[in-house]
Image (cartoon, coloured by chain):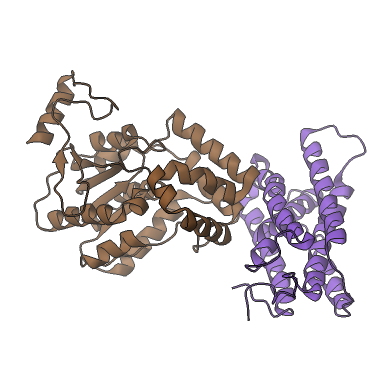
Chain colours: A brown, B purple
Amino acid sequence: MPFRDGLVARGFRVASYDMLGQGQSDKPRLFIDQADQVAVLRDLIAELGPRPIFVGGISFGGVIALRYAIEHPDTIAGLVPMSSFAEIPPQLMRLGTAMRTALILGGTTYLQDLLFPMNFSNAWLEAKSDLIGLATHRGWLINDVYALQNLMESFLEFEPLTPRLSSIKVPTMIMTGEYDFLTPRTLQDSLRTHIPDSALVIIPRAYHAFTLERAELAAYVMARFAEDVIAGRWRGKKTIWVAPEEVGGELTPFPAGFDHLRAIPVRLETPEHAVQSELASS
Amino acid sequence: MSTLLGPLDQDDRIPPRQQTRVAAFLMSAHGAQARQLAATLPIHLLQPWQLELHAQYCREMEILSLLTRATTWVPDPALAFMIWQWEAAWMPQPMPGAADHLHGLLVDMAALGHAIHAGIRPAALLPEGVAPTDPFVLAMRRIEFESGRLLQAQILFLKGPQLVDVRDEVSAAVERRHAQVRELWTSMLGGLNVGTE
């Protein structure tokens, strides 16, 4: 996995795993309780021993990472929710329900066929057409319809985390793909506005699965965050940044005075937004 | 021990002996489901869930018909003992802790259905290079695909509000049936020198 390898190459120890119900992890037959997902993460972190630990989670995994940070605040040095969310607004609910139906009626392969164009750019899909066939087959082989269904249902029925986000005190870098329409930027921004020591980083030209499509860049940005936190340089301040196009570049503040939630350049009007963009540019 | 069926014959087909064993197991399991569904269905369908059961029954019958016609059968003396063993395993085992005997039977029937439709993945055994339009191969793929849909009735029933009070017992019943089906499936495949891990 290039994202993991990118972090290892920068001197980090990386522990990654499939969520319950997915891939090679246990597949509860009927019910998956999100509390069990948090318990798995807690046990893993306990196993890693005392050291600065950063928790990252992608999409569904980001929700579990957020819940973990809320419930076990003193055990981690930093948090990185990626392409994630703390609640399910109508668009995401309808997409999630439709994907669940796709899984039930069309099987794992049909769901994957839907997810690939939602997760990646045209350029990546064109360049990786051979890999997609293999990945689809492997995904079908190691996953089970009932287990994925349980996992999806556990998220479609989950209790919104937004009211509890303010209790997250650790440095938090929220990462989002510029073109992510599965979990759009408004969802990531809701994390930013509620988590005190947070910053939002937009990965340019990326979709939902930027840790796969832009793996090296994502690893670079994440490593910089961890290094800044460990060195005491991190200042979240609910700021908004744009990641560089390539590894080694600098993060730049989102242009001051413009609304980062719009797809066209629109100037901010509210005082609250003005303050935020001022912080971003400082 | 391979995790896939084969080696393939000269026409890139699954060897008939393997086809016979796998198809016999699937016919036994899906046949048990069809019998149990037939016994549960009333003459006149009155409730929505009864229509669902009727649809399930028809699909199970389709699977049986498909296996009968798509398999290249060969004589297999060992099947006599195996089929007796399989059929004994499918016998109803009412869930302990149910409100009444009938309820316990229904949960067990759904648990067995869950184990058969979720736990048996015949298409995952097909090796790369197998003739894609071979009837047995198509049948394996179709059965696995249909199982994902058939499973929904069991999931709806087992996760339904009427069983909330006995959720632990239901989960235990499902787990027990999964373990049983997995053991028989693994053992049958082991006899063909095919491993499942």
Residue B5, by quadrant, is bottom right
For image coordinates 68% across by 41% down, the residue present is B162
Q: Is residue A64 visible?
A: yes
Examine the rendered structure and indicate whether residue A179 appears above or below residue A49: above
The front one of B32 and A117 is A117
Image coordinates for residue B152, horizontal then vertical, percent: 68, 45
Image coordinates for residue B100, horizontal then vertical, percent: 78, 49
Image coordinates for residue B43, horizontal then vertical, percent: 93, 38
The front one of A49 and B32 is B32
For image coordinates 28% across by 38% down, the residue present is A191
Image quarter in which the N terminus of chain A is found: bottom left
Would residue A277 be found to the left or right of residue B155 on screen? left
Examine the rendered structure and indicate whether residue A275 appears above or below residue B119: above
Q: Is residue B95 visible?
A: no
Image coordinates for residue A176, horizontal then vertical, percent: 30, 42
Examine the rendered structure and indicate whether residue B15 appears above or below residue B175: below
Q: Residue furthest top?
A: A269
For image coordinates 85% across by 51% down, the residue present is B61
Q: Residue furthest right?
A: B43
Would residue A254 be found to the left or right of residue B75 on screen? left
Q: Residue furthest left?
A: A282
For image coordinates 45% across by 30% down, the residue present is A91
Image quarter in which the C terminus of chain A is found: top left
The front one of B40 and A198 is A198
The front one of B40 and A243 is A243
Would residue A108 be found to the left or right of residue A177 on screen? right
Residue A128, by quadrant, is bottom left
Q: Count numbered badges in the picture.
A: 0
